[in-house]
Amino acid sequence: MQVLRDSSEVIEEYFTVMRREINPSKEYERLTRSVLSKIDVSTATQTDIIKFLDSLRKPEAADPMDKWIGRYNLYVAILKRFFKWYKTMREGEYEYIHEFKERINEIMSLQKKHHQIVDSPTEPTTVKQTSLAELHRLNITLSNYFDVAPDIINGSTLSETPKAKAVTSNIIV
């Protein structure tokens, strides 16, 4: 899966979705395409967008009737609509990563509970043995998760990140 896509691909996907949802006029598409092409939508920061919008402002002497405000407001509406869609698309694209992390956190929480049972002087030996067996099963599951983790940070797998190494080195096998 390609993590970063260039702006033109993102914009084309946006228009494909927009045509399915609202069937925009050719003029609206042209205007939207013109606005979005003025910034790199796939890497633009909030500061970049604010600078772009500020460049539309005209001094009172250059535009005494404040005609720039209509264009400014139209551009803001176009950008808001696009970035709302873009944020939703990006969250959906990486939803599996969040689910993956939640499952790892759940396993680690269960491991802590089983460690407490094993370390408890009041628990019966049979309960401790059962907890140790469950700990072993959880360790194997977690190890498998780390082995198949997708590339998340700079092309390294989750199992190669410093935090993951620290976690896996503390796991009793």
Image (spheres, rainbow, N blue to C red):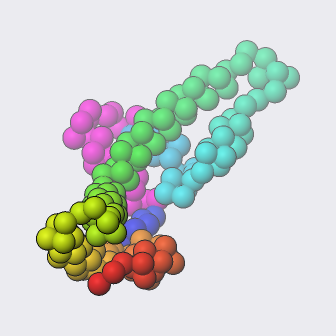
Residue at x 71%, y 19% (from the top left corner):
66
Q: Is residue 119 left or right of residue 62?
A: left
Quarter assignment of residue 24:
top left
Q: Is residue 114 left or right of residue 3?
A: left
Q: Nearer the viewer, residue 98 or 114?
A: 114
Residue 46, placed above or below residue 57: below
Q: Tell me where residue 50 appears, x and y as whole percent.
A: 66, 40
Q: Tell me where residue 166 appears, x and y as whole percent.
A: 48, 77
For the question of whether residue 112 can be seen, the reply is yes
Q: Is residue 108 left or right of residue 144?
A: right
Residue 103, placed above or below residue 129: above
Q: Nearer the viewer, residue 156 or 71?
A: 156
The outermost residue toward the right is: 61
* Residue 105 highlighted magenta (yes or no): no
* Residue 25 highlighted magenta (yes or no): yes
Residue 46, placed above or below residue 126: above
Quadrant of the frame with the C terminus = bottom left
Q: Nearer the viewer, residue 128 or 71?
A: 128
Quarter assignment of residue 59:
top right
Q: Is residue 105 left or right of residue 7?
A: left
Residue at x 30%, y 52% (from the top left corner):
92
Q: Nearer the viewer, residue 169 or 56?
A: 169
Q: Tell me where residue 126 appears, x and y as whole percent.
A: 14, 71
Query: Which residues are the magenta region?
Result: 7-28
